[in-house]
Amino acid sequence: MTYIRPAFRHPELPRNELGFTRKDYEGAISTLCAGCGHDSISAAIVQACFELSIAPHKVAKLSGIGCSSKTPTYFLGNSHGFNSVHGRMPSVATGANLANRDLIYVGVSGDGDTASIGMGQFTHAVRRNLNMMYVVENNGCYGLTKGQDSATADIGSASKKGEPNHFEPIDLASVALQLGATFVARSFSGDRQQLVPLIKAAISHRGFAFIDVISPCVTFNNNPKSTKGYEHVRDHLAATGTVDYVPFKQEISTEYEQGQSKEVTLHDGSVVHLHKADPELDLNSRRSALRLIKDYKAKDQILTGLLFMDEKSQDLHEILGTSKTPLRDLGEAELCPGQKVLDKLNESLR
Amino acid sequence: MKATNTRDPEYFHKVVDCQYACPAHTPVPEYIRLIAAQRYTDAYMINWESNVFPGVLGRTCDRPCEPACRRGRIEEEPVAICRLKRVAADNKGDISDRMPIIPKKKNGKRIALIGGGPASLTVARDLMPLGYSVDLYDDQRAGGGFMRSQIPAFRLPEEVLNDEVDRILDMGVLTHFNHYVDSLKAVLDKNYDAVFVGSGAPRGRDLDLPGRQAADANVHIGIDWLSSVAFEHVENIGKKVIVLGGGNTAMDCCRTARRLGGDEVKVIVRSPFEEMKASPWEKEDAAHEGIPILDNHVPQEFIVEDGRLVAMRFDRVKAVYDSNGKRSLVSTGEDPVIVPCDDVLVAIGQENSFPWIERDVGLEFGKWDMPVVDEITFQSTNPSVFFGGDAAFGPQNVITAVAHGHQAAISIDLHCQGELVTKRPPPGVTLVSQKMGIHEWSYDSQVENDQRYQVPQAELEFTLSNRKLEVELGYDAMTAFQEAQRCLNCDAQTVFTEKLCIECDACVDICPTDCLSIIVNNSEEAELRQTLKMPANNTEQDIYVSENLRTGRAMIKDENVCLHCGLCAERCPTAAWDMQKLYYSVTKAGQCG
Ligand SMILES: Cc1cc2nc3c(=O)[nH]c(=O)nc-3n(C[C@H](O)[C@H](O)[C@H](O)COP(=O)(O)OP(=O)(O)OC[C@H]3O[C@@H](n4cnc5c(N)ncnc54)[C@H](O)[C@@H]3O)c2cc1C
Ligand SMILES: Cc1ncc(C[n+]2csc(CCOP(=O)(O)OP(=O)(O)O)c2C)c(N)n1
Ligand code: SF4
Ligand code: SF4
Ligand code: SF4
Ligand SMILES: [Mg+2]
């Protein structure tokens, strides 16, 4: 009996700016099914945080319930974490973010956790433009409860049980676009090259950054009739283009073809390059993204990649004009300024 | 790069670094697991089949396996492979019923072995069970060659040696001890079907310096002196002793001198300390016994006063390297160093010498007056004369002599059966899945973090006063178990089946040492190595390349730091990776075809 991850790592592991190796961003060994797409996403998050040289204690991981929501245990073991109840991660994230605006918020959810029980919570986090990365690990089913169809399952798609789904699917990327998310992308757990730069850009983005990651459930929804299995997704994959994430300070060395390339500078100075595969896409237009998602779907293709970005986005703190100092850093004097100030306030309202 | 052909058994053999590095290719991980399971007799027999002298080698082997051990590439120290072997030997039960049966009826072929060291004894061990009649000639009074005359008893107790030598002689070898062979022609005239020369490299180098003749009574050639001690012709030495030389012989000389009355024993060597030929553990043992090593001192003169050696003069040097890295020792110009002494032991090397081989018996001699010997068949230019051990290509070590002996025995057998000696038998190979269930393997795949365990030693006050008292005490059963658990089971091979892989990346992500990558294979090896998840910079280690997978990419594995933890196979949803045990055994004489 094993299943204990050895302590040894490759002796030549590279170190990032903080002197950390990838190992410093790992979590506990995964207890998900062997081959679950969610594990690939965890590995992509590890890789992205390592490459961004994020101090692990500067990250808070938040999730709900589900196989996907279990994954924060399996990455960033040195970061903060909160496993909320089913579908309630957005409100916990909102509270945490308002109390401490200095942390990086990484939300991980499932299609059940977000598109079913948590839909109401999700929509409000989006429209408030909460500063966080919100990843949905989308397998078209409730993996943890043995594979019931979820609200993102396509019509006609059948899981292991074999019964085709009859209901219209919710396209979470479209919902996020409609509700005002300021960064929207879609990806596939099996496409690390695309996913890692998207995560890096999403983390660097200020505002609500949503990534819908198709992530096969090998155990319950990886059969030939499922539209969320490895084979189907690979065969129907299309991309808006390739994304390069260039951190602030690093000089841009690649040469980009005119016209086909879009360059976006984020508020922290880092740059996102999209080499467009489809010239139709206008990265700053929600309508363009919504239309393309539909067009590709009509062609039976899954459009992945960066779909929309509003780099001038104002997050909840800016909209509300909250204190620049995180609430949790304010002392008693600032938080309870005393009777005089209260009197003055009351006076002003009379 | 072309996909790897894993049907060639050498691919997986090379992954078992220790076994591959062992000249006799002892199945190391297999016997280590048996030791952990306290199956000492089984562990001993695996060794005995490969290396014939597990008790001797478990104490004295040069251990080429240990620097090769994978463990040394992921942490400080390799597994104590050698000292674990000793545990098997010390704790084995009765093995008499496991010995090969010696046919009563002989096959009519007669073989002469010249020299009774490990090479000759191995030939006897392999040929006796096949019905050969074997005559062994040696000028010493008992078998074992240098194992008896050179390796001091405090490293190798006589009982251990006798046990393993006698096991072979008791197969019915006709021994002619105290018999110096002074003519090969005379041996050939006795109409042997084949002659094996395992006479070693018995001549120690002398140092011709001013004063050498006058000091003769107190200057001794190291290996001659050690054998005089072993055979009890010499029982003491002066109080102040200088040992010249930096190899293992020098270490045995100084430690022996320390036990024979040398209170102030110094090793003095020309080269820098780090470049001495002695194994690091031999240097440590000498230091532990209070023997200083003076490096960068070149001997100049034996100083004799009143007809007696009183000191030696040395010039201090430093090592200078030219652009090709070639070293020269250049005098520092400082004052000469005078070191007082009563006796000097010269341990600056040994060489072959074949005064007893006539040059007209169809046996060609080549460079440095060494016989011309084929490196695979060990046949000389006289088709019925074979060489092995130190006699073949110069001084090496016991395990090399054994490996030569096995191969020479195959050749002798082929030669006597009228077959071509070049028809070498293929190795015996099995590759079997170790999967027993979910998360369950038939080997202990969990990787232990323990550092190498020290072998306990007897107290100096006892060892230094008794030349025959063994210094090392050996591991006890518990420590042996813990040390055995450090073994990574490199014979549990990762075996990949392309058509099962769904490219989910689970194996790539779980691999603790980043051995795996799924990438497009469209370049040559050197470039491909650099495009992996972790660049495969150790080019001595192979990379495995699969056929292309469904997406057109290939699974690539850098063998370098694979822990054989089996996590790739555990995390694979389709069992595209499997852990399969390679058992690779070198075929011996008579086992072919
Ligand atoms: C001081 C010292 C310490 C060593 N320690 C180690 C060690 O710890 N570990 C290790 O692996 N190796 C060690 N070695 C090396 C090792 O002993 C040899 O490499 C090994 O014994 C070679 O085996 P062999 O069978 O070729 O010959 P040998 O063991 O040298 O045996 C040859 C035998 O042939 C006899 N002989 C030679 N010529 C004739 C003749 N004409 N007629 C009859 N008999 C003859 C010799 O007397 C000798 O007995 C050591 C060597 C020395 C000198
Ligand atoms: C309030 C509540 N209702 C129902 C459940 C049962 N439940 C657990 S996980 C889950 C669905 C999870 O689906 P998803 O978010 O897609 O995660 P997956 O396992 O597919 O990754 C449900 C319904 C629960 N834990 N709590
Ligand atoms: S049930 Fe499905 S989603 Fe859950 S761990 Fe297994 S494969 Fe992944
Ligand atoms: S056995 Fe597999 S998972 Fe373990 S180190 Fe080797 S390749 Fe990696
Ligand atoms: S875990 Fe198995 S199926 Fe998945 S990529 Fe590795 S070998 Fe292929
Ligand atoms: Mg789900």
Image (cartoon, grey):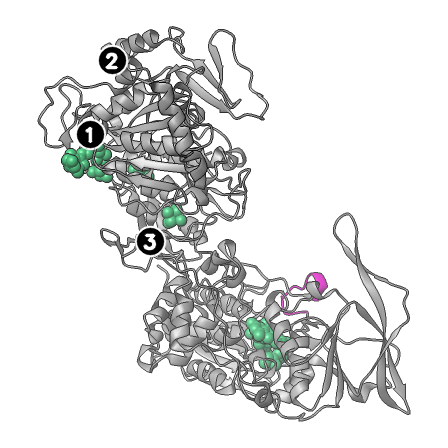
Using the image, determine if residue A77 lies above or below residue B265.
above
Q: How far across and down, in percent of the image, does residue A164 sit?
A: 10, 23
Q: Which residue is mark 2?
A: A297
Task: Tell me if I can see residue A146 in this picture.
Answer: no
Using the image, determine if residue A91 lies above or below residue B250.
above
Category of crowding for the residue at label 2, using alpha-carbon neighbours closer than 10 angstroms: few (below 14), some (14–19), many (at least 20) = few
Whole-Å distance between the Cαs marked 3 and 2? 42 Å
Q: How far across and down, in percent of the image, does residue B32 sit?
A: 39, 67
As for residue B365 lying within the magenta part, the answer is yes
Q: Which mark is residue A112?
A: 1
B266 vs A51, left or right, is right
**Chain to which mark 2 belongs:** A
Q: Earlier in the sequence, mark 1 or mark 3?
A: 3
Using the image, determine if residue A228 lies above or below residue B140.
above
Mark 1 residue's CB less than 8 Å from ligand 2:
yes
Q: Which residue is mark 3?
A: A4
Q: What amino acid is at disc 1?
A: Gly
